[in-house]
Amino acid sequence: MTDVYDEDLYRRTKALIEPGDIDLVGLIVHTDLSGQEDLEMHELTVGLNEVIAEHAGKGESYIYAGNDNTDFASNQFQGLTLADDAFVWECQQLLRQGTFDLVFYYEADVDQDALVADVEALGHVDRASTVWADE
């Protein structure tokens, strides 16, 4: 683990992307948003959906909140393609030490450096950290 901002969150994210049917990469987005900034959190999540979907080359996507699914937790979301509801990303919004951290994971075949640069260019993002399954 080099240059890890939050070791506990890094370990938890790494556990989410352990090898399975598809190779995944994780992204931890540390924000400056407090627990009182729900609207801004929603807007940031929409922006992150667009950035990740673009880099993943999956086409247009929408955010599924899972309110009708008991397998979903509160503040857990998925990006799915409009064309066929295919997986683009999954996210958990976590309030840690007074601000939100967003944990995303998605298929590992993106240009991660370019994606991180675009994510960090969004408003309210303090920093974004990549989590690889094989580190």
Image (cartoon, rainbow, N blue to C red):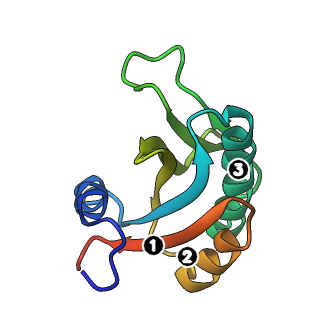
* Disc nearer the start of the sequence (3/2): 3
Is 94 left, or right, of 36 in this rendering? left
Is 44 left, or right, of 70 in this rendering? right
Looking at the picture, tell me which residue is in the foreground, 30 or 78. 30
Rendered location of residue 9, percent (x, y): 30, 57
Separation of marks 3 and 1 at Cα, in angstroms:
16 Å
Reading the image, the residue beneath label 2 is 110
Is 101 left, or right, of 58 in this rendering? left
Of all residues, the one furthest to the front in this rendering is 98
At label 3, the amino acid type is Leu
Looking at the picture, tell me which residue is in the foreground, 35 or 22. 35
Reading the image, the residue beneath label 3 is 44
Q: Using a 10 Å C-alpha cutoff, classify the residue at mark 1 as few (fewer than 14 neighbours), some (14 to 19) or many (20 or more).
A: some
Separation of marks 3 and 2 at Cα, in angstroms:
20 Å
Q: Secondary structure at mark 1?
A: strand
* Disc nearer the start of the sequence (1/2): 2
* Disc nearer the start of the sequence (3/1): 3
Residue at the (51%, 60%) spot, across then down? 30
At label 1, the amino acid type is Ser
Looking at the picture, tell me which residue is in the foreground, 80 or 8. 8
Question: Comparing marks 1 and 2, which lies closer to the viewer?
Answer: 1
Rendered location of residue 75, percent (x, y): 49, 32
Separation of marks 1 and 2 at Cα, in angstroms:
15 Å
Residue at the (53%, 79%) spot, across then down? 112
Residue at the (47%, 44%) spot, across then down? 98
